[in-house]
Image (cartoon, rainbow, N blue to C red):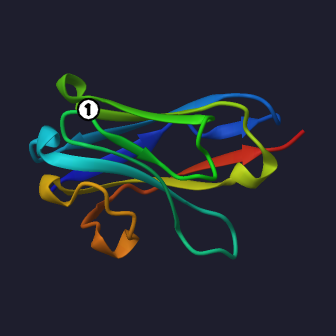
Amino acid sequence: QLRLRESGGGLVQPGGSLRLSCVGSGRPFSAYVMSWFRQASGHEREFVATISTSGGGTIVADSVKGRFTISRDNAKNTVYLQMNSLKGEDTAVYYCAAIAGSLYGSAQSSNYAYWGQGTQVTVSS
């Protein structure tokens, strides 16, 4: 079983930046497409970004395009989410998730078999 653990969340002022990390263990990390989702209080879980197994392909949701960047380091079994120009509406619990490599491009949370525990991001002055 692939285990995932996020870190890097916290409180940041509007316009600020954070970098989230997600470390995988237990299965070959490079075999999985990795994605980030988020869930704000009272809302459904929302797709944020995804990255292919090699890191050569990325897809970012329109709501964060130009502000968020997803990347991965397979040697470190880690996927990152760099978040810049943060806004209040980015406040949410952020989750990393993994899916088989053949399913790159899926933004449907129900397709993902493996999830981290989540890390809280709060954007407030």
Residue type at the position of mark 1:
Gly
Quarter of the figure with the N terminus: bottom left
What residue is disc 1 on?
Answer: 56
Q: Is residue 45 above or below residue 85?
A: below
Q: Residue at x 14, y 38 (%)?
A: 30
Q: Residue at x 18, y 23 (%)?
A: 75
Report whether 6 appears left or right of 30.
right
Q: Residue at x 36, y 41 (%)?
A: 58
Q: Residues within 10 Å of mark 1 (few under 14, many from 20)?
A: few
Q: Nearer the viewer, residue 54 or 3?
A: 54
The x and y percentages for residue 27 are 10, 47
Q: Residue at x 26, y 32 (%)?
A: 56
The x and y percentages for residue 78 are 30, 33
Q: Is residue 35 above or below residue 53?
A: below
Report whether 98 appears left or right of 39.
left
Report whether 52 appears left or right of 96.
left
The x and y percentages for residue 2 are 18, 53
Residue 110, picture quadrant: bottom left
Report whether 117 appears left or right of 29.
right
Q: Is residue 20 above or below residue 73?
A: below
The x and y percentages for residue 67 are 63, 35
Residue 107, picture quadrant: bottom left
Quarter of the figure with the C terminus: top right
Q: How many marks?
A: 1
Q: Nearer the viewer, residue 55 or 24?
A: 55
Q: Secondary structure at mark 1?
A: loop
Q: Is residue 124 above or below residue 38?
A: above
